[in-house]
Amino acid sequence: MSIIHTQRLSDSPYVEAITQGWTMSAGSTIRPSECNWHMVFVKEHGRTHKLIVGPLPTAGVASWGEGAEILWIKFKLGVFMPHLPVRDLLDSEKSLPEAASKSFWLKSAVWELPDFENVDTFVNRLVHDEILVLDPVVDAMLQDQLPDISSRTMRHHFLRATGLTRSRISQMKQAQQAMTLLQQGVSILDAVHEAGYFDQPHLTRALKQFIGYTPAQIAQSNQPE
């Protein structure tokens, strides 16, 4: 295995998950779409790269080098930095300027690099300084609590906080659900029905677009050799 990793949940209502990984060798793989954005810290060859990685609207290819230690902070949908619009980060990443060997600049202030254990403290400071905020409208809508506002206003909130429309997020989550069903051994035809697709070609197009594999490829990968 070219990457090993460990993941934990966070006590912060702003964070989806925290992951630490190590690359044992160089490699690449097809990666699925991703509706959440991340802060990523990559230590390699004596340097640390500080990145904000935006949502990934479609499947693509992820590549990595050997000997890197990586910390991923995955933020919940609806959480964003007002001074760095998520819509400007779609399918891209932004490097944060280095302040010193173990610190970086973010919104005109110097921040120490977080580690796997103190991410919650780091995030709490971002929230306290109002660098990181949660859009309550998006949070409510994701829990199917529709606020009394116009559809145009809802769309504005989603684009500002996530960079994506609500329908696009639903399509991505639907494809993830179908992938999980196929990985659990559910037949392709049953996955069509359970995930809410019109027919098998509809499922195939969605999985190719958002996961990067066909239903048959996903089902086959789960079969014992």
Image (cartoon, rainbow, N blue to C red):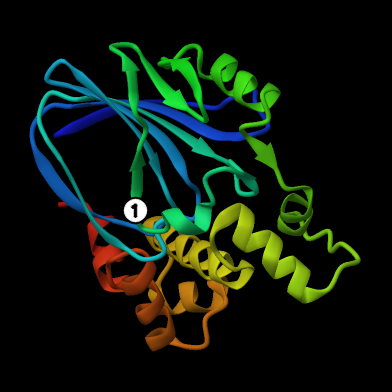
Q: Nearer the viewer, residue 40 or 201?
A: 40
In terms of secondary structure, where does tag 1 sit? loop
Seen at 72% across and 55% down, the residue is 138
Q: In the rendering, at what x and y percent does residue 133 appear?
A: 68, 38
Seen at 47% across and 72% down, the residue is 191
Residue occupied by mark 1: 92
Q: In the rendering, at what x and y percent does residue 60 appear?
A: 26, 61
Which picture quadrant has residue 137? bottom right
Q: How many marks?
A: 1
Q: Judge from the rendering whether residue 204 lies leftward or rightward of residue 165; answer left or right.
A: left
Seen at 42% across and 79% down, the residue is 203
Seen at 87% across and 68% down, the residue is 149
Q: Quadrant of the N terminus?
A: top left
> Above or below — where is 88 with respect to 126?
below
> Above or below — where is 12 with respect to 81?
above
Q: Amino acid at mark 1?
A: Ser
